[in-house]
Image (cartoon, helix red, strand yellow):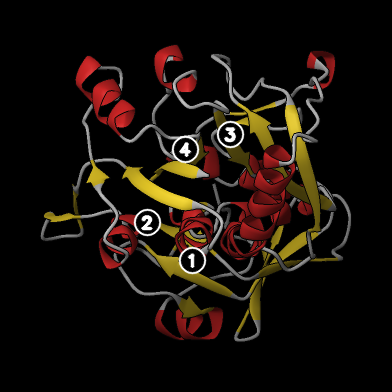
Amino acid sequence: MKVFFFGTGEIGIPSFHALAEATNHQLVGLITQPDRPAGRSRELRAPAIKTEAVHYHIPVFQPEKIKTSSVLAQIRNFQPDIGIVVAYGQILPKEILELPRYGCLNLHVSLLPKYRGASPIQAAIANGDRETGISVMYMDEGLDTGDVLLQAHLTISKEDTAATLHDKLASDAPEVLLKALDELTKNRAPRIPQDGALASYAPKIKREDAKIEWNLPAEVIEHRIRAYQPWPGAYTDIPVGEDGYHTVKVFSASVVSIPRAIEPGMVLECVPEGIVIAAATEGILVRSLQPEGRRLMTTEEFVRGNTLRVGIQCR
């Protein structure tokens, strides 16, 4: 089967690699996003998946906009049997979706119809879900609304962050994808319509979404701290000495018991082992954090270098 791949995010690299190594499939081309400025130097940086394609001598195309006749003509030249889409970053037009003989399949990292949209991994952790998974979906013109071909389930651990869960899903994806393609080529692949009434959405995350709201239950805050790692990083403002408020990103944290009727956001303990901050119910023990413009550090390092007091109010 001749496969054309659409992908930009690193989550698609293991699947791309599996297709490139497969003996019963031919990976004929990659469409990915253009090289973008990155880092403090703002030098152009290619998507990591492009490096994979160059290694395998697979043609790479990086159109600024995919909805053009020239892109359609480029894909048509390869006469693909199927298109595979994994975190590409643009919406494919109907003309491209219908061009391959078997259409296009999308690997979406949720158990559809739950968490359609841009941030299903973060949504699953933030909402305290115990499992997520991968859905192989026949693509249509809607937002993750197509019929489902195959799903695989994955348990979310209490320690998972968006980064660790991303890597687990990326690792599981090749097996799921190759199984779906096998079912398709043997003409036994199902088409299971999604129940729109059960759909939920996970929109693109903005930095302000990660600001910690201390008037929420501690469990909810802890979920969000893990959900927003590595980006944008859950953050709060802490008053430090006479310098005013400092913005810090919170990383390692856990829920702890505290006395009742404490103002949310109040610092209750400030010791080398951690900083305890009150939430609406119980408290959050912060073990590591990153002050704005500085490196990640333990709270012991932070407390040693800053004047903090019990009773100060985070915001």
Label disc, if present, on residue 221 of the rendered structure: none
x and y percentages locating residue 44 in the rendered image = 13, 53
Query: Is 199 above or below relative to 152?
Result: above
Q: Which residue is mark 4?
A: 208
Local SS, label 4: helix
**Alpha carbons under labels 2 and 4: distance apart:** 20 Å
- Residue 283 sits above or below residue 272 on the image: above
Q: Earlier in the sequence, mark 2 or mark 4?
A: 4
Query: Tag 1, which secondary structure?
Result: helix
Location of mark 3 (residue): 105
Neighbor class of circle 1 (other Cα within 10 Å; few <14, some 14-19, many 20+) is few
The span from disc 3 to disc 1 (Cα, nearest Å) is 19 Å
Sequence-wise first label, 4 or 3: 3
Q: Position of residue 310 (x, y in %)?
A: 63, 68
Report how far apart the C-alphas of labels 2 and 1 lie in the structure.
56 Å
Residue type (three-letter) at the residue carrying disc 1: Glu
Residue on which the image places disc 1: 21
Q: Position of residue 149 (x, y in %)?
A: 75, 34
Mark pair 4, 1: CA separation: 41 Å
Q: CA distance from mark 2 to mark 3?
A: 52 Å
Per the image, the residue denoted by label 2 is 244
